[in-house]
Amino acid sequence: MMQPGDRVTVCRSVVVFTHPEHRGKAFDMEGQEGEVVQLLNDWKGRPISPTLPVLVAFGRFRAHFREDELSAA
């Protein structure tokens, strides 16, 4: 189980269109290394089951992932 502060690497092909250096263009995040910021599992004290529960920061850019798309760095 990942914890906030863990270093992770994107181990699968995940295409984003919001990367600040490639805005509006497809950018594959595979191989990028970042830090887990938050695990989304509750909202106002109530349990939730989000589709993309792991928030990862890559410098100033942040993106949501599933746990199976990440591996420990």
Image: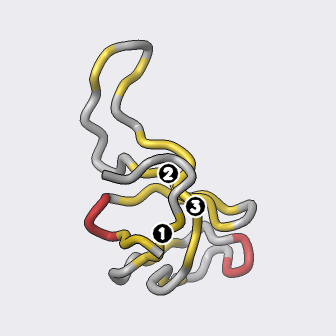
Q: Nearer the viewer, mark 2 or mark 3?
A: 3
Which quadrant would residue 65 be assigned to in this image? bottom left
* CA–CA distance in space, label 2 to label 1: 11 Å
Per the image, the residue denoted by label 2 is 55
- Please say if 48 is above or below 60: above
Q: Using the image as rendered, state which of residue 32 and residue 71 is in the foreground.
A: 71
Q: Is residue 64 above or below residue 68?
A: above
Position of residue 56 in the picture relative to residue 69 (left or right): right
Q: Which amino acid type is marked by label 1?
A: Val
Where does label 3 land, which residue? 35
Q: Earlier in the sequence, mark 2 or mark 1?
A: 1
Element at label 2: strand
Q: Nearer the viewer, residue 36 or 62?
A: 36
Residue 45, given in percent of the width and then of the height, sits at 38, 13
- Asked if marks 3 and 1 touch (Cβ < 8 Å), the reply is yes
Horizontal and vertical percent position of residue 17: 55, 72
Pick the front one: 22 or 37: 37
Do tag 2 and tag 1 residues touch (Cβ < 8 Å)? Answer: no
* Residue at 33% from the left image edge and 81% from the top image edge: 12
- Say whether marks 2 and 3 touch (CB < 8 Å): no
Q: Which residue is mark 1?
A: 8
Q: Looking at numbered disc 3 in the image, what kind of residue is underneath it?
A: Glu
Helix, strand or loop at mark 1: strand
